[in-house]
Image: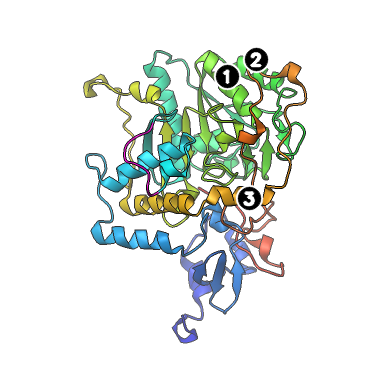
Amino acid sequence: MSASQRTPDLVGRDLDVFWHPCSQMRDYRDFPPLEVVGARGARLRLADGREIHDAISSWWCKALGHGHPRLLAALRAQAEAFEHVITANTTNAALVRLCERLLAAANGLGPTAFGAGAPAGRRAGHFGKVFLADNGSTAVEIALKMALQAQAQRGAPARTRFAALENAYHGETAATLSVGDLSLYGAPYQALGFPVTRLRGLPYRRGPHDPAWLDACREWPAIEAALDAEADALAAIVYEPVLQAAGAMRLFSPDLLRRLRAWADARGVYLVADEIAAGMGRLGAMLASHLAGPGAALPDFAALSKGLTGGVLPLSAVLTTDAVYRLFDADYFEGRAFLHSNTYTGNALGVAVANAVLDVFAADDILGRVFAPRSNRSPPPAPASPTCALAGWSPPSTSSLPTAPRSMCAGAPATASTRRPSGAARCCARSATPCTSSRRSR
């Protein structure tokens, strides 16, 4: 865009009409919003000619960078066919293909099973069905609704309570604020929420080379006691696996996922894994839940978004099991259907781009490239105290476990800090190299 094409007072016009997300608008008087005129790779081009790093990966969704040619080609090709058609009573090849490939990837199968050349059809595995929506908050709400309804329809209508972790973030709709634990976002809306059993004293660790990375036995008794106190009322436990991104980039031991899985299986409680920030390769595996070992701690519901379309278009997915699905499979008049809908469920443009993302992940070996820089490092240690290990469980071979990547964003060079001063964008106002706003959203 040339200087003659720009409106000199665009910022003033912006502040007259646009309410920026997650912002105290008054701050923009001192730190005007940056006018972006282009974006490629990890860089944004501004109207004044500067180039800056999109260090927050546009709220952690640009897993493959801006302007990726294969994603844009898929978008253009689909737009020439059709851009959106209701999916309540229609289907299309790209939609079915995406679901098959997501299931394969989430079930831990390799690139040959989810890449462009993967055979058609569903492969056996833990997850069996995909429900699509349009953003992360909605995906988590869908999983909560499914868990609640599934409990009632399998004969446990008294199971209406949820447990969630300290420092959790799950979005900013009413239910997701309830299960979240960041009062900065939730406090003004407590009247809309519901009580949640909060699990505290988590097994926070420095990373895969922490001697207790694969051992949560020290913290588990207190967590187990809190769960036991609500065992008969819980519908599900909700968590971000391993990485609490908006909660100050905290990491906790993957062993906690194994212990939650064993506890929940023994008591008829579902697990809901919010993989929106940590999934799609961000921690070195397609799902962060895979860090607990192959099949060791897969949840009953997994929510994906952000990197699912490489940040090109809004799309989210909830993956669940055949056992859950069967609880909803009945004659319509029995009232067991899951009657949730989003206008743009299965949006064809988003689906096309998501298929292209999986093409790139497989063809460019994205996960392998995340692992490669640490090939000369020693594997994470086994738990130091086998006497307090989970009953019936032995540590998996460390060679089979992915480790956390060199950065929190596969395919991007950096991630901005979540520690935020008093302004929406003031974190960058006085830095030598400007960055974009550092706060997570759905």
Marks 1/2 in contact by CB < 8 Å: the verdict is: yes
The answer to which of 193 and 93 lies nearer the viewer is: 93
> How far from the left and from the top, in percent, is residue 319?
42, 34
Alpha carbon separation for disc pair 2 and 3: 34 Å
Classified by dominant secondary structure, the portion drawn in magenta counts as: loop
> How far from the left and from the top, in percent, is residue 262?
57, 19
Total count of labels: 3
The answer to which of 238 and 21 lies nearer the viewer is: 238
Marks 3/1 in contact by CB < 8 Å: the verdict is: no
Residue ID at (55%, 47%): 367
Residue lying at the far bottom in this picture: please name it: 4
Q: Which residue is mark 2?
A: 391
> How far from the left and from the top, in percent, is residue 187?
60, 40
Q: Residues within 10 Å of mark 2 (few under 14, many from 20)?
A: few
Range shown magenta: 116-123
The amino acid at mark 1 is Ala
Q: Which residue is mark 1?
A: 262
The amino acid at mark 2 is Ala
Alpha carbon separation for disc pair 3 and 1: 32 Å
Q: Is residue 407 visible?
A: no
Q: Secondary structure at mark 2?
A: loop
The reply to whether the magenta stretch includes residue 155 is no
Residue ID at (43%, 64%): 69
Q: Secondary structure at mark 1?
A: helix
Q: Secondary structure at mark 3?
A: helix
The answer to which of 165 and 109 lies nearer the viewer is: 109
Who comes first in sequence, dot 2 or dot 3? 3
